[in-house]
Amino acid sequence: MSARRIADLTEDEFEDLVRTSLRKELFSTVGLRLDDQEDQDEAREDFRLLRKIRRCLDGASSKIGGAIIMALVSGLLWLIYLGVHAFVGKTPS
């Protein structure tokens, strides 16, 4: 990097320069190449695929969690039923 001064930049030009520099550094750090429109479209599709996978996994985990809770509640109700049945079925001597 050089230490020379650049004069006569408008605010818009400076913002564009900073935005371009940050985009190059930031995206190259995470491994994204967004030089042209095709690269941007491919990156967008990759992120859409990742979102679909995440949503599928979230849906599956919520269904599995619901099934586990339903099994626990059913087991608890069955134990209560057996306890009441055993208590009522007993005759005092």
Image (spheres, helix red, strand yellow):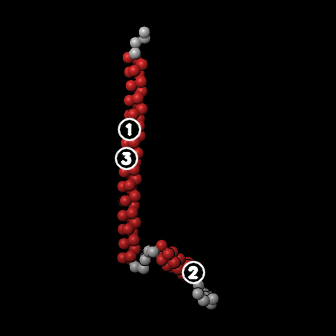
Q: Is residue 77 above or below residue 38?
A: above
| Residue identifier under label 3 | 63
Q: Which callout, 3 or 1, points to the residue nearer the camera?
A: 1
Relative horizontal placement of residue 87, taking residue 20 as reference (left or right): left
Kindly check if marks 1 and 2 are in contact, taking CB atoms under 8 A apart as contact. no
Q: Nearer the N terminus, badge 3 or badge 1?
A: 3
Q: Position of residue 51 (x, y in %)?
A: 39, 61
For the residues carrying marks 1 and 2, which lies nearer the camera in this image? 1
Question: Dot 3: what SS?
Answer: helix
Which marked residue is nearer to the observer: mark 2 or mark 3?
A: 3
Discs 2, 3 touching: Cβ within 8 Å? no
- Identify which residue, 11 or 53, lies in the foreground: 53
Task: Tell me how many marks there are.
Answer: 3
Callout 1 environment at 10 Å: few (<14), some (14 to 19), or many (20+)?
Answer: few
Residue at numbered disc 1 = 71
> Of residues 18 and 13, which is closer to you in this image?
18
Residue shown at 40% from the left, 58% from the top? 54
Q: Nearer the viewer, residue 16 or 4?
A: 4
Q: Amino acid at mark 2?
A: Phe
Q: The disc labelled 1 sits on which kind of residue?
A: Ala
**Residue that numbered label 2 is attached to:** 14
**Image quadrant containing the C terminus:** top left
Q: What x and y, as percent, mark residue 8? A: 60, 87
Is the residue 31 above or below the residue 63 in the image?
below
| Element assignment for label 1 | helix
